[in-house]
Image (cartoon, grey):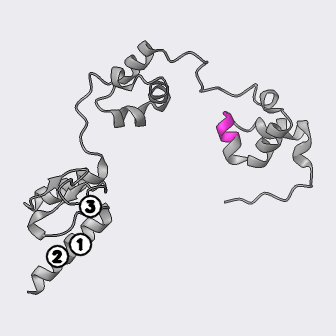
Amino acid sequence: MERRKKLPNGYWNNLDNCLAEARKYQTNSEWQKFSPLSYRSACKNDWVEQCSTHMATSRKPDGYWTLDRCKAAARKFKTKVEWRAGDRASFSAANRQKWISECCEHMEAGGLWFGPAAIAESLLSRDIPYETEYRFKGDSEISRTPYDFYLPGFNLEPLVQLWTQLYLFRVKQSLASHM
């Protein structure tokens, strides 16, 4: 990575210097990422608009995301997770306007998020019985804790995190192989 030479104090307080620096970038986010000092100075001195006239804007105008446009964007995806990853702008607008349920009517029923899905897959591949719950109401000690998995065959307490679950599973495997 190439290091820049130190610039004199107040260098970015000059409009011409900020303009010259901003011309090197195609978008405001690029400018902000690769030259944060000049960008911050332009913000402080209210020059951002002046310095970024040549830049492409990726932001849609206010009011662009209507319910119909959000639904059209959502139709391209099978799940909410895919939609959020593939078109964050439309997803955020729908979420902000509370349209998510309307936009996602066509989508597949939500499966488990990554952590529980990985655990379930691991347990199923090893033929280990498990119960999936967010609350175990029958046990007063843990009834208020949001656990995901309980392994009754191992007589273990419900496990909170993926790492803890995998670690304990491996310990059980290790103990079984040493007996």
Q: For label 1, count other residues whose C-alpha is less than 10 Å away and answer few (under 14), some (14-19) or many (20+).
A: some
User: How far apart in space, not on screen, are marks 2 and 1 (Cα)?
Assistant: 6 Å
Q: Is residue 78 above or below residue 44?
A: above
On screen, residue 125 versus residue 161, left or right, reads left
**Does residue 87 appear anywhere in the picture?**
yes
Residue 94 horizontal/vertical position (percent): 45, 24
Q: Is residue 30 above or below residue 1?
A: above
Q: Verify whether residue 10 appears in magenta.
A: no
Q: Which residue is mark 3?
A: 142
Considering the numbered disc 3 on the image, is that residue within a helix, a strand or a loop? loop
Q: Which mark is residue 172?
A: 2
> In which quarter of the view is residue 5 placed?
bottom right
Residue drawn at 41 percent across, 34 percent down: 84
Q: For label 3, count other residues whose C-alpha is less than 10 Å away and answer few (under 14), some (14-19) or many (20+).
A: some
Q: If the image is split into quadrants, where does the C terminus sit?
A: bottom left
Considering the numbered disc 2 on the image, is that residue within a helix, a strand or a loop? helix
Amino acid at circle 1: Leu
Q: Which mark is residue 168?
A: 1
Q: Earlier in the sequence, mark 3 or mark 2?
A: 3
How many numbered discs, if any? 3
Amino acid at circle 2: Lys
User: How far apart in space, not on screen, are marks 3 and 2 (Cα)?
Assistant: 22 Å
Q: Which residues are magenta?
A: 27-31
Is the residue under label 3 in contact with that under label 1 (CB below 8 Å)? Answer: no
Is the residue under label 2 in contact with that under label 3 (CB below 8 Å)? Answer: no
Q: Main secondary structure of the magenta part?
A: helix
Amino acid at circle 3: Ile
